[in-house]
């Protein structure tokens, strides 16, 4: 097991990464203010892992309420959130009841938002079971639900007390979901950690093959990068925005396609290439860098092209992005490989060219 800490003063919390962690009650019990938990999972994960987590807790004298939700991004909404509240209220869960999110990013975001708002705030723990949630969404305290007009538009910053990333859960992850997680892993190399990007280029085949040692290394380095950023900028007032490379484009892809039709990580991958092409158009990176990013995404099994929706539809959806300020879309772009920047100075003509797939590098 490897461990690191998200440094947030009195609200600091550990991240534990490794195999066979679900049954390690000694890692969980110190973070429970009372021997009462509600485990929130979904219809895919619960049959596989709920009892593996709940059994040892029951044996340790912890009272458990189980909440099993439908699986999929299409259910990340206020209606499903209300189902969580219904279950908590029926079970008479109290302020010292800890919510445990057992699942991927949807379950983690829903459970975290429920914890932030139920009885005006109860403790929660993240037990992510997908690669994407282990390296990204479980860390940093972003919680929330989608709205038909935009992804993650309703939510709160609310930190967990513990993140328990059991790599054994990745053995049952579909290949497409594994690839989706690799998009977020690659992101860290592109935005702030060039040596990690180079490590990924050397080890991407081992990651796709689910080599345990390679996965643990990639998860730890990803979490360490995110923990450092969150410690510096918890509420995304500055540097944390860089973690959204590809997300302005990617969220537009997800919304236009209908939630659940494009996996989040796949949309981020396609969005990252759009961000890279925009960076190329601004003269910041070169054509060889685009080729390098495309090659890594292809080896990871990720898409490199966005679906061909109308450019005006993309622009409309991106204008509703959370990072919009004073009516201007703020893009996360690449100044060079390993260094991202936030910029609102993207010419509309360039943006239209990139979105329409007719991008041509300016002469000179």
Image: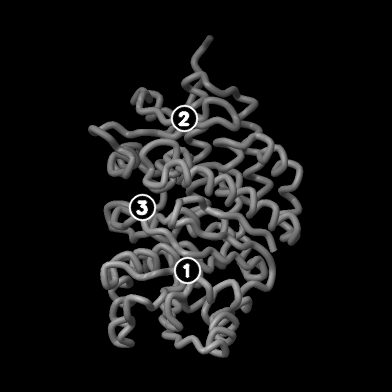
**Which numbered mark, 2 or 3, is in the foreground of this view?**
2
Label 3 CA crowd tier, 10 Å (few <14, some 14–19, many 20+): many
Q: Nearer the viewer, residue 201 or 308?
A: 201
Could you tell me residue 178's position as x and y percent? 61, 59
Residue at 48% x, 49% y is 267
Could you tell me residue 21's position as x and y percent? 64, 72
Q: Is residue 263 visible?
A: no
Spatial separation of the CA atoms under disc 2 and disc 1: 32 Å
Q: Quadrant of residue 39?
A: bottom left
Label 1 CA crowd tier, 10 Å (few <14, some 14–19, many 20+): many
Q: Are marks 2 and 3 in contact (CB under 8 Å)?
A: no
Task: Note whether 360 is above or below 175 in the view shown.
Answer: above
Spatial separation of the CA atoms under disc 2 and disc 3: 25 Å
Q: Which residue is mark 3?
A: 255
Q: Is residue 319 left or right of residue 26?
A: left
Q: Are marks 2 and 1 in contact (CB under 8 Å)?
A: no
Q: Nearer the viewer, residue 139 or 110?
A: 139
Q: Which residue is mark 1?
A: 125
Could you tell me residue 175's position as x and y percent? 63, 62
Mark positioned earlier in the residue sequence (3 or 1): 1
Residue at 64% x, 32% y is 291
Tell me the element at label 3.
Answer: helix
Which residue, as the protein is rendered here, is positioned at the far left? 326
């Amino acid at each position: 097991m490897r461990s690191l800490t998200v440094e947030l003063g009195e609200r600091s919390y550990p991240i534990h990464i490794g195999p066979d962690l679900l049954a390690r009650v000694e890692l969980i019990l110190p973070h429970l203010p009372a021997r009462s938990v509600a485990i929130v999972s979904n219809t895919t994960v619960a049959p596989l892992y709920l009892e593996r987590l709940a059994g040892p807790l029951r044996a340790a004298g912890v009272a458990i309420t189980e909440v099993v939700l439908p699986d999929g991004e299409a259910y990340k909404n206020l209606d499903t959130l209300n189902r969580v509240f219904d279950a908590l209220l029926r079970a008479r869960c109290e302020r010292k009841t800890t919510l445990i999110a057992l699942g991927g990013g949807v379950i983690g975001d829903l459970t975290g938002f429920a914890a932030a708002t139920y009885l005006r705030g109860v403790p929660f723990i993240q037990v992510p079971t997908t690669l994407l949630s282990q390296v990204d969404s479980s860390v940093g305290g972003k919680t929330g639900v989608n709205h038909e007009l935009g992804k993650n538009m309703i939510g709160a910053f609310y930190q967990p007390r513990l993140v328990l990333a059991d790599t054994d859960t990745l053995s049952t992850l579909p290949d497409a979901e594994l690839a989706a997680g690799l998009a977020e892993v690659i992101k860290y190399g592109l935005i702030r950690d060039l040596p990690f990007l180079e490590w990924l280029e050397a080890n991407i085949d081992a990651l796709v093959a689910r080599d345990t040692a390679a996965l643990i290394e990639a998860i730890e380095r990803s979490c360490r990068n995110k923990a450092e950023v969150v410690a510096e900028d918890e509420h995304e007032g500055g540097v944390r925005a860089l973690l959204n490379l590809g997300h302005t484009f990617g969220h537009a892809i997800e919304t236009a396609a209908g939630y659940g039709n494009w996996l989040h990580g796949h949309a981020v991958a396609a969005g990252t290439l759009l961000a890279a092409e925009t960076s190329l158009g601004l003269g910041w990176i070169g054509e060889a860098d685009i080729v390098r990013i495309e090659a890594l995404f292809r080896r990871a099994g990720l898409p490199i092209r966005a679906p061909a929706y109308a450019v005006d539809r993309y622009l409309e959806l991106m204008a509703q992005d959370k990072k919009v300020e004073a009516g201007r879309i703020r893009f996360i772009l690449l100044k060079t490989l390993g260094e991202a920047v936030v910029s609102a100075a993207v010419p509309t003509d360039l943006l239209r060219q990139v979105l329409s797939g007719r991008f041509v590098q300016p002469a000179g």
